[in-house]
Amino acid sequence: MEALANKLRKQRKDEKFFNKRSNVPKNADSTELYDKIKVLSPLLFNSEVSMEDKMKHILKELDTNDCERLKLFLSFIRKLLCQKNPITKDLAIKLRYVDKFASLVNTTDSEALFEVLWSLSNLAAASEEAVEQIRAKGIQYRIVELVDSTNEEIKEHSLWVIANLIGENNEARNEIISTNLIEKLIDIMSLKAARKSLLELVCWIISSLCKGSPLPSTERLKKLLKPLNNILHVEDEVILSDTMCAISYLTRSNEEAIKLVIEYITITRITELLLHPNGLIKKSALIILGSICMGETKDIEHIINSGCLNNLSIIFQENIECDILKYAAWVVSNIAADLKSHIGKIISSQCLSRLICVVINIPEVSIQKEVLYAITCCILAANNDQLKQIQELKINEMLVTKLDTADTSILLLVLEIIDKLLEAGDIGTLENKYARNFHDIGGKYKLELLLTYSNEVINTRVLEILNKYYPYDDLPCDTNEMDVGY
C-alpha cells in the first residue's frame, strides 16, 4: 500500500508538471515561432523525414553561435518535449541532448537558460536514463546554484529539475543533500510573499530529501523542521500533504529523527489533521503519531492529551479506505501496549467499541487482523473492572461470529481475547457469568467445532479454553471421536 501511495503521489506531480508545461495556448508568439522555424529549417516540417532525423537536425542547430537562432531552436525543442507523446523524449535521450544542455546551463542569457531548464525538467521526469545522463554531466550542482537566481522563472524551473531528479533516484538525492540546497529551501520557506508554486516545489523536494538514507544532519533537520511546522497551518492541500509526508518519513527513519519531530513539530496540529478530508494527509498524521507512540511514555501521554484518541474514534466511525483504518488501529495498538493506565482512556474515547464495530461491519481480512490485534492489546492490558466494562460492548457476539473464520491468524487473536475476557469471571466454578453468557450465545458450541480445525495450535488453544472455563461439561478425550466437522 505504501508503494501504491507513492506511485499515485508521483502521478499527481507528473500530471501537474505536464499541465504547467504543455497547456500553453497557441498564441501569436507560438505561431510566429513556427513560421520562423519553417524558414530556417523547412526539413522539420517535411512529413517524409523521420522524427529521428528531425531531432538530429535540431541538435545540430543547437551548436549555432547565433544567440537568437539558438533561442528559437531551444524554444522549439522545449515545445516538442512538452508533448505527451514519448517519442521526442525517447529520441532526445537516445541522441544525448543532455550533453548539449550541459554546456548551455552556464549561459548568461536568461531566455536561453529558461528553455534549457524547462527541457531538462521534462527529460528528468520522463526517464531514469535521462536522470543518469544529467548526473553524469554534474548538471545537478549547477542547477542548485541557479536556485539563488533573482529571476523567478529561473528559480522555479531549477526547482522543477531538482524535484524530478531526486523523486525516485536515491543517488541523485544523496548528491543534492551534499550541497547547500536545504539552506536555500529554508530561505524560500521563510519568505512572507513566497509564490504558492514555489512553496509547492520546495515542500515536494523536502519530502524527497526526508525519504531514504542517509538523512540530512541533525543540525540541518532542526533548521528544516521549524519552517515546516509553520507550513502545517496552510490550507493548500498540495503543500500540506508534501509537508506531512516529509515529517512522516522522518518518524519512520530513526529514533533521533523522531525526537526532533517531537521537539519541533506541534503535535496538537498533527492530531487535528487526523480529520483532514485528504487521505494522504490523514495517513501521514497516523504514521507520525503511531511512530511516536512506539517510544517513551511521556511522549505517548502527550499524544493522548492532544485529543488523539477522540479523533481516532471518529476515524473508526467513518467509512474510509482500508489503509487508513489499519494505520489508525496500529496507533491504538501502540498506545495500549505502553501502559495499562492508557486502557481506560481508550475505552472512554469509544475507540474500543468502534473497533469492535469495524470488525463486525468490514469483512476485509487485512483490516480485521490489524483491528483485532489492537483489540487484543487493549484486552490483555485491561484490569478486571475494565474487562467488565468491555463485556458491555457486545464484544462476545463479535467473537462468536469470528470463530467461523478460516483465517488462522484471526482465530488465534480471537481465542486470545476470549481467554482473557472469560478469565475476568470465577475460573472453574459454575458462577462464571462471562463463561455462561458466552455459552448461551453459542460460543462454547463454536469452540467445540474448532477442535477439528486443521491446525494443531488452534486445536490445543481451544482445548485449553474449554478445560479452563467449562471443566464440568462432558468433553471428548480424543478429538477424533467427535462426529462434527469444521
Image: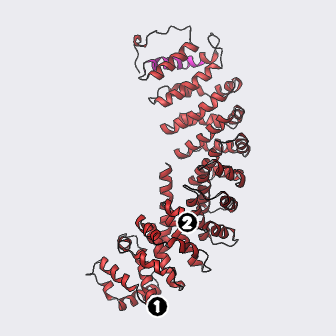
Query: Quick check: 290 above or below 121?
Result: above
Residue that mark 1 sits on: 68
Q: Residue at 46%, 75% (x, y): give it.
A: 119
Identify the element where label 2 is drawn. Answer: helix
Which is more toward the observer, 480 or 484? 480
What is the x, y in percent for residue 474? 50, 7
Residue drawn at x 51%, y 20% as measured from the top left: 461
Mark 2 nearby-residue class (10 Å; few <14, some 14–19, many ≥20): many
Q: How many marks?
A: 2
Name the one closer to the observer, 246 or 440: 246
Q: Hey, what amino acid is under mark 1?
A: Glu
The answer to which of 213 and 123 lies nearer the viewer is 213
- Residue for badge 2: 176
Q: Is residue 96 magenta?
A: no
Residue at image coords 64%, 16%? 433
Left or right of 136, for residue 142? right
Q: Give the range drawn in magenta.
A: 436-452
Q: Relative to 451, does residue 263 appear above or below in the rendering?
A: below
Residue 122, x across and y down, in percent: 45, 71
Magenta-highlighted stretch: main secondary structure?
helix
- Tag 1 near tag 2, CB within 8 Å: no
